[in-house]
Image: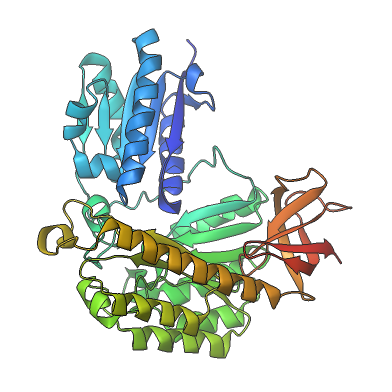
Amino acid sequence: MPKKKVYIETYGCQMNVADSEVMATILTENGYVLSNQIDDADLLLINTCAIRDHAEQRVLGRLDLFNSYKKKNKQIKIGITGCMAERLKDSLFEKKPFIDFIAGPDAYRNLPDILNTVETRQREIDTLLRKEETYEGIIPTRYNSNRFSAFISITRGCDNMCAYCIVPFTRGRERSRNPKDILNEIETVANDNFKEVTLIGQNVDKYRFENNGTITGFPQLLDMVAEKFPHLRIRFSTSYPQDFTEEVVLVMKKHKNICRYIHLPVQSGSNKILDLMKRGYTREWYLDRIAMIRKHLPDCAISTDIISGFCDETETDHQDTLDLMRQVRYDYAFMFKYSERPGTFAAKHLKDNVPDNVKSRRLNEIIELQKQLSLESNKCDVGKSFKVLIEGISKKSDAYFFGRTSQNKIVVFPKENAHLYDIAEVVVTDYTSATLLGKLV
């Protein structure tokens, strides 16, 4: 009897990519084979994100497409997993009655039982958040991988409870994986000739694993990984300003294989807004973290997240954000308008009272300033040489490769004698605000 085929579609952050790989392992160990073709599958899974409403609307649209295949073949099963499944729970059955099952981020071990159930009755749901679940012992299947870079989950959940964020409610409390489990997973991808790993978590700085009285924190874990795998490029994301320590930076300084790049989300440059957001730090604290990074790692690129138009944001608060951006001089940034998420502290206790046109105007000003800062940052790289991990062929010309520097900047350069997934030495000859241009050394 041929095995059933599963098609998995993933939306959202790096954590969701890692979760989809966990699901792939569980399903393939229980009689399924993976398919890259939606029209060739017996099980259609969509792994979801709930951070912004736009992401949820896209998922609802994709589910309608899934249903068009189910109408042609009644045996097809449709499942929705991840944060959106956790947030909306069984109300999803009301929105999309053709869904067969719903599984939250801590329910993936139960997928085989869930699937057995939906074979005999119409629907099943498991959105229980389990405080101990880290998917220990499961080596994720890199089923749709680029074959050179892997995401390695080191924590699950989040305890920070930022006012605007739904993640603590959809992913549960913070849990850290056993470092032995993490090292085993990295060894697997290293043996498969991957060139780079990214240690991921909602807040990697809160990593803390205790075993027989010995505590391993994030600096110790980072040191272990870099020491054991000197030929791998090591990245990590995301750091949290309140918890980010000098010890982490000193570990980065110690190991050349840890990439010179830190993503440190600020969200706002206004102390009033940071307080309303429940971020737990001030702009002064944040700028002190930046100064510490610059002191030890002057060649380190820094990126950030910025939200425009949070509740009660005034023009003065907005100008504080622009001023902080000028002080830090970010290499690049991820910038968004505030989008209220049901269930968060902000939705319950604060008014989303900044008009949308004002949010848009402020966001555009943030974007324009960041373009200028990125352009100036890239200009400083002209004439410098960088080791670049070649990731693919340029979209504009088959004669060019593109790859990333240790600083996570994209470089485009002629192929010449280089090969995909090599690490090549490239000298920068020109630049735009988004891309470096170069040639092989």
Instruction: Give the image location of residue 113, x and y in percent.
Output: 27, 28
Q: Is 182 in front, or is 147? A: 147
Question: Residue 302 versus residue 6: which sits nearer the camera?
Answer: 302
Residue 150 place in picture, x, y as percent: 56, 52
Instruction: Pinpoint residue 249: horizontal percent, then vertical percent.
Output: 51, 82
Is residue 138 shown to the viewer in this render? no
In-front residue for pair 431/199 = 431
State the residue at coordinates (89%, 52%): 417
Residue 295 to residue 35: above or below: below
Q: Residue at x 10, y 63 (%)?
A: 349
Q: How is the image coloured?
A: rainbow
Disc count in the image?
0
* Name of the residue lying farthest toward the left: 349
**Quadrant in the picture for residue 317:** bottom left
Tell me which residue sits at (55%, 86%) in the image: 294
Image side of residue 430 versus residue 13, left or right:
right
Whether residue 291 is situated above or below residue 434 in the rendered picture: below
> From this viewpoint, is residue 432 visible?
yes
Q: Nearer the viewer, residue 181 or 144?
A: 144
Side of 274 relative to 360 (left or right): left
Q: Residue at x 79, y 64 (%)?
A: 438
**Percent of width and height locating residue 235:** 55, 65
Say if 178 sits above or below 206 in the image.
above
Q: Which of the image's four quarters has the C terminus?
A: bottom right
Quadrant in the rendering for residue 346: bottom left
Quarter of the image where one finds residue 181 = bottom left
123 to the left or right of 115: left
